[in-house]
Image (spheres, coloured by chain):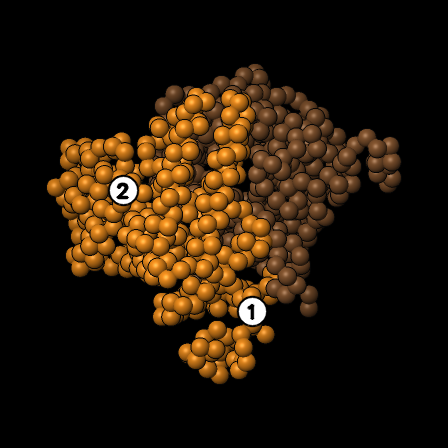
Chain colours: A orange, B brown
């Protein structure tokens, strides 16, 4: 009933015992990544078997089919007339693809209402038209990347997988220096990447502080018109850049998404990002400063020792965090 | 009943007939808001009577009394300086909390009809939830300013502020658990005992933007002492993920497609995919309802992994839904949700409605057919 994807490539490890059909002829079209179950009534245990296998398989899968599944997703997105302004993760439990930002319907609606109230409706409409073009362009990039695009696409897929895999590693093992060294090299390369392109275009993803974010909502008619058209056009010019030319750009996005947690001052929990902040130290701090518009000072990344409780200091000093006592504030600078 | 509404079209006046905006022939709430309803909430079971509150893009929050015979009486209304994005009740039913795009959350004391500000953010307040804990109570507000704040309503400053990496898009609270769905497919789980602390950050089981989240409880203890064990997460891609916080078996977590058109099979052309706007769990049966931009609502049994019912299609998207405390009334609100942008919005033709449906039997768990 459901065709085995691995068998068609000759790499099915289950053989006779495989849950899925081993067919000799051509593959069924329309198989999405999630895919095999079409109706909800089918036993989901089978479905979950399949998807967990595919999750493992994606690591050893040749990259071509990753790109194919992304391509298929883009086709479904377009043919299903899905909402346009959404981020996209090419696999469950993987980080989102860099460069595609989430905008919710409520955010757009609020802009429209405010634009209406301040007689700026055409500015809003132009912004939306530009935004649509941008997202559609990105979508077709993901769908049919040219030669340059393919390389950086595969690169970014790998980076995303690595950062997600490494997050698992870190969570399960002690914070050894080898892992952190990998992280340091991973992040320093990318964080010094093209700062001006960082989260461009989309007004919401602007890494300015939240205070300036609020300014956008209150802004006068002039501010509304100018502030949005600026970033959008910048990004449109660099769309090619983001997807085709510079792998570093894409790194930067995914690294920033991994690193954005600590820069937002919360280093609690068992997330990778918490580790990043701890171990990256100065390089991270510097690049974060260069990427943000100067709003977050260096001092916000580290807590002065005398502000920490003794329990927190103990936690930072020990080789491993104890569950339930992980500090929610960044460590002091000398401990990083 | 039959025929009296449908005949409107013969006289040519109304362009939308009741048949199109209320094809399920459910009870209509009188004096609905003038603009899309962002959020609905029923009063808690601690009150003898049943009240419904709705926040709307017309900046107002309204309250109706819903009597068991189906009569709906408008009671009162309050206003914000911007569209109301979320509404919720306090645990004793004496206050309604409202979060708005005017960056504040307010507390509406129903006895005195006072509407005072209790929270302040740097961006629109997207979610408000009342936390009733064992040794504290507070209001949790989530905002597009990337913070989650906890407020003692008597103090002007928050008890606690959590910095988030992303904007808050949706949240739910069932003590002692809170789940926040953020932009960029983030999920953060908090544990609220003693004081709110971050419990876990997860990668999303869904590939696209998060739209709504609802916590479910262990069915065995649901009516006595509800223990949250997981949540349902809806996205803009017509898909819901059922996720257990600590699954006994990783296969317990799954996703299902919903609110898609053109049939259920892969063959037969591409499906139209619609966002899932709201998810609500039945307080007694533990089954869930989803409402989508396709203008339908569906009931599901997540344990039997089956669909219980799908409604007829309304002429407008359904933006919000909720169950009353006893689980015999299902409320859903139709109105334009902006999923097709500004051009598709016609305020004259797209009047929002709130419908109430008697639902206790329909949401019973699926019986295994032997």
Q: In which quarter of the image is residue B153?
A: top left
Residue A19: x percent and y percent?
A: 51, 76
Residue A59: x percent and y percent?
A: 36, 67
Q: Distance between the residues labelled 2 and 1?
A: 41 Å
Q: Is mark 2 on a helix, strand or loop?
A: helix
Q: Quadrant of residue A328?
A: top left
Residue bearing mark 1: A29
State left or right for residue B327 relative to residue A67.
Answer: right
Residue bearing mark 2: A195
Q: How crowded is mark 1: few (under 14 residues within 10 Å), some or many (20 or more)?
A: few
Q: What element carries label 1?
A: loop
Labelled disc at residue B195: none
Name the residue rendered at 32%, 33% in the picture.
A208
Name the residue rendered at 65%, 54% in the picture.
B261
Residue A195: x percent and y percent?
A: 27, 42
Q: Mark 1 lies on which chain?
A: A
Name the residue rendered at 19%, 48% in the picture.
A280
Q: Residues within 10 Å of mark 2 (few under 14, many from 20)?
A: some
Which of the pair B127/B146 is nearer the observer?
Answer: B146
Which of the pair A3/B354 is nearer the observer?
Answer: A3
Q: Quadrant of the N terminus of chain B?
A: top right
Q: Which chain carries label 2?
A: A
Residue B249 visible, this angle: no
Residue A264 visible, this angle: yes
């Amino acid at each position: 009933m459901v065709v085995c994807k691995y068998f068609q490539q000759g790499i099915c490890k289950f053989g006779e015992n495989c849950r899925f059909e081993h067919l000799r002829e051509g593959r069924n079209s329309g198989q999405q990544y999630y895919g095999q179950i079409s109706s909800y009534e089918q036993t989901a245990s089978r479905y979950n078997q399949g998807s967990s296998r595919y999750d493992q398989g994606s690591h050893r899968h040749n990259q071509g089919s990753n790109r194919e599944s992304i391509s298929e997703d883009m086709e479904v997105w377009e043919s299903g007339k899905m909402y346009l302004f959404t981020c996209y993760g090419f696999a469950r439990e993987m980080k989102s693809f860099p460069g595609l930002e989430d905008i919710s319907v409520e955010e757009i609606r609020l802009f429209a209402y405010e634009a209406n109230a301040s007689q700026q409706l055409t500015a809003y409409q132009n912004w939306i038209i530009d935004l649509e073009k941008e997202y559609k362009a990105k979508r077709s990039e993901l769908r049919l990347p040219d030669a340059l695009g393919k390389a950086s696409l595969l690169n970014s897929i790998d980076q995303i997988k690595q950062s997600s895999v490494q997050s698992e590693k870190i969570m399960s093992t002690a914070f050894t220096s080898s892992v952190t060294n990998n992280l340091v090299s991973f992040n320093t390369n990318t964080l010094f990447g093209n700062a001006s392109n960082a989260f461009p275009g989309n007004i919401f993803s602007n890494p300015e502080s939240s205070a300036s974010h609020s300014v956008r909502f209150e802004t006068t008619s002039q501010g509304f018109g100018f502030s949005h058209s600026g970033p959008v056009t910048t990004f449109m010019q660099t769309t090619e850049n983001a997807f085709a030319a510079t792998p570093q750009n894409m790194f930067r996005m995914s690294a920033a998404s991994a690193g954005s947690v600590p820069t937002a001052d919360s280093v609690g929990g068992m997330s990778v990002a918490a580790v990043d902040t701890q171990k990256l130290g100065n390089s991270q701090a510097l690049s974060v400063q260069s990427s943000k518009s100067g709003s977050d000072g260096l001092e916000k990344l580290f807590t002065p020792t005398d502000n920490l409780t003794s329990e927190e200091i103990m936690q930072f000093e020990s080789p491993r965090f104890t569950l339930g006592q992980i500090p929610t504030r960044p460590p002091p600078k000398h401990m990083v | 009943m039959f025929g009296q509404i449908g005949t409107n079209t013969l006289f040519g006046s109304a362009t939308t007939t009741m048949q199109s905006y209320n094809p399920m022939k459910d009870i209509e709430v009188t004096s609905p808001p003038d603009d899309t309803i962002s959020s609905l909430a029923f009063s808690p079971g601690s009150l003898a009577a049943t009240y419904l509150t709705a926040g709307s893009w017309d900046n107002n929050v309204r309250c109706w009394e819903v009597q068991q015979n189906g009569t709906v009486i408008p009671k009162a209304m309050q206003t914000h300086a911007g569209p109301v994005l979320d509404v919720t009740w306090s645990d004793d039913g004496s206050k309604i909390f409202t979060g708005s795009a005017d960056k504040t959350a307010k507390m509406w004391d129903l006895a005195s009809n006072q509407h005072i500000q209790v929270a302040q953010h740097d961006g629109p307040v997207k979610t408000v939830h009342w936390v009733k804990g064992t040794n504290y109570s507070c209001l949790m507000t989530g905002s597009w300013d990337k913070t989650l704040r906890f407020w003692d309503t008597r103090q002007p400053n928050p008890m606690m502020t959590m910095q988030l990496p992303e904007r808050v898009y949706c949240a739910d609270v069932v003590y002692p658990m809170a789940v926040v769905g953020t932009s960029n497919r983030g999920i953060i789980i908090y544990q609220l005992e003693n004081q709110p602390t971050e419990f876990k950050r997860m990668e999303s089981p869904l590939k696209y933007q998060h739209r709504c989240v609802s916590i479910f409880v262990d069915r065995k203890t649901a009516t006595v002492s509800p223990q949250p064990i997981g949540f349902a997460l809806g996205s803009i891609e017509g898909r819901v993920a059922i996720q257990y916080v600590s699954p006994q078996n990783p296969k317990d977590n799954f996703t299902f497609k919903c609110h898609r058109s053109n049939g259920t099979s892969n063959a037969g052309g591409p499906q139209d995919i619609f966002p899932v706007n709201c998810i609500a769990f039945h307080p007694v049966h533990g089954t869930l309802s989803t409402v989508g931009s396709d203008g339908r609502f569906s009931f599901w049994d997540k344990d039997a992994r089956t669909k219980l019912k799908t409604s007829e299609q309304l002429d407008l998207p359904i933006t919000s839904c909720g169950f009353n405390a006893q689980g015999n009334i299902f409320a859903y609100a139709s109105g334009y949700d902006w999923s097709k942008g500004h051009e598709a919005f016609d305020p004259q033709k797209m009047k929002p409605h709130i419908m109430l449906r008697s639902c206790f039997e329909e949401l019973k768990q699926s019986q295994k057919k032997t």
